[in-house]
Image: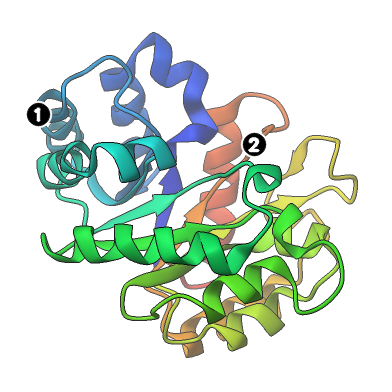
């Protein structure tokens, strides 16, 4: 499984100096990144910055408004940076209470991206796993075409919601090209934990990811404990010790 970084983790540094931050990420031994915007650079400029730093884009997070309203912009971004996957990172669940209705819209986005050889994934938070079963997230995936709509499980949020990450990894095996590797201190309102120092059982999670065919394990921290790049470096060191590269 390849090790990547969601650039939202280092958003402050990227906002100040995108090119320099990409170089520092490469210095940490990370080869893959997932975009969270282009930090004021054009698509082509960002792609060139990645290449200059020796990095490759495994995916990019793109909002619903763009994916639905301007899919050509999403495709242009993916092609400029060489990403083969785009992920829908967040929705307002209150505005989409019916996952079956929303699934029709997600399927349509998946069809449009597929025309250009790009795969769509849906990234979860905890709120899609709240309430009574069948849960919103499972209903969404049941109502979408697995060939067009992949899962990008955020394993930290799965744990926060009270479910075992391995259960969800196994449930969506074969539909899971990427996962977010996020650890927690035990309090979802507190800072994230350095991987291996939190409450996720990586010794069971990582083998399950390999078995499920996950291609990219992507480090993400919403609230890094301390300097973001230093935190990323510690997480990367931990995951490399577990066989990721």
Q: Earlier in the sequence, mark 2 or mark 1?
A: 1
Q: Is residue 74 left or right of residue 198?
A: left
Q: Is residue 178 left or right of residue 115?
A: right
Identify whether 202 is placed above or below 92. below
Check disc 2 and report its element: helix, strand or loop: loop
The residue drawn where x is 26% and y is 20% is 19
Q: Is residue 232 left or right of residue 46?
A: right
Name the outermost residue toward the top. Answer: 16
Q: Position of residue 207 (x, y in %)?
A: 57, 84
Q: Position of residue 159 (x, y in %)?
A: 78, 64
Distance between mark 2 and mark 1 Cα atoms:
27 Å
Check disc 1 and report its element: helix, strand or loop: helix
The residue drawn where x is 54% and y is 40% is 232
Q: Is residue 157 left or right of residue 153?
A: right
Specify few, some or many for label 1: CA neighbours under 10 Å numbering under 14, 14-19, or 20 or more: some
Identify whether 160 is placed above or below 174. above
- The residue identified by callout 2 is 222
Q: Position of residue 231 (x, y in %)?
A: 61, 36
Specify few, some or many for label 2: CA neighbours under 10 Å numbering under 14, 14-19, or 20 or more: some
- The residue identified by callout 1 is 44
The residue drawn where x is 36% and y is 23% is 21
Q: Position of residue 174 (x, y in %)?
A: 42, 86
Q: Is residue 133 visible?
A: yes
Choose between 212 and 174: the one closer to the eye: 174
Choose between 223 and 174: the one closer to the eye: 174
């Amino acid at each position: 499984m390849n090790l990547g970084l969601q650039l939202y983790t280092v958003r402050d540094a990227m906002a100040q100096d995108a090119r320099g931050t990409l170089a520092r990420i490469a210095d940490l031994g990370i080869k893959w990144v997932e975009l969270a915007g282009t930090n004021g650079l054009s698509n082509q400029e960002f792609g060139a910055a990645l290449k200059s730093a020796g990095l490759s884009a495994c995916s990019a997070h793109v909002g619903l408004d763009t994916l639905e309203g301007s899919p050509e912009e999403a495709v242009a971004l993916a092609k400029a940076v060489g990403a083969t996957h785009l992920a829908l990172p967040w929705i307002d669940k209150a505005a989409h209470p019916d996952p079956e209705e929303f699934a029709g819209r997600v399927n349509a986005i998946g069809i449009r991206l597929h025309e250009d050889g790009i795969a769509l994934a849906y990234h979860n938070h905890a709120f899609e796993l709240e309430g009574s079963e069948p849960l919103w997230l499972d209903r969404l995936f049941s109502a979408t075409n697995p060939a067009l709509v992949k899962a990008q499980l955020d394993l930290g949020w799965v744990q926060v919601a009270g479910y075992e990450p391995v259960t969800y990894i196994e449930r969506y095996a074969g539909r899971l090209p990427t996962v977010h590797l996020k650890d927690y201190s035990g309090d979802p309102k507190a800072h994230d934990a350095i991987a291996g120092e939190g409450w996720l059982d990586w010794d069971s999670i990582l083998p399950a990811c390999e078995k499920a065919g996950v291609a990219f394990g992507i480090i993400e921290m919403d609230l890094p404990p301390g300097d973001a790049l230093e935190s990323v470096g510690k997480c990367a060191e931990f995951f490399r010790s577990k066989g990721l590269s």
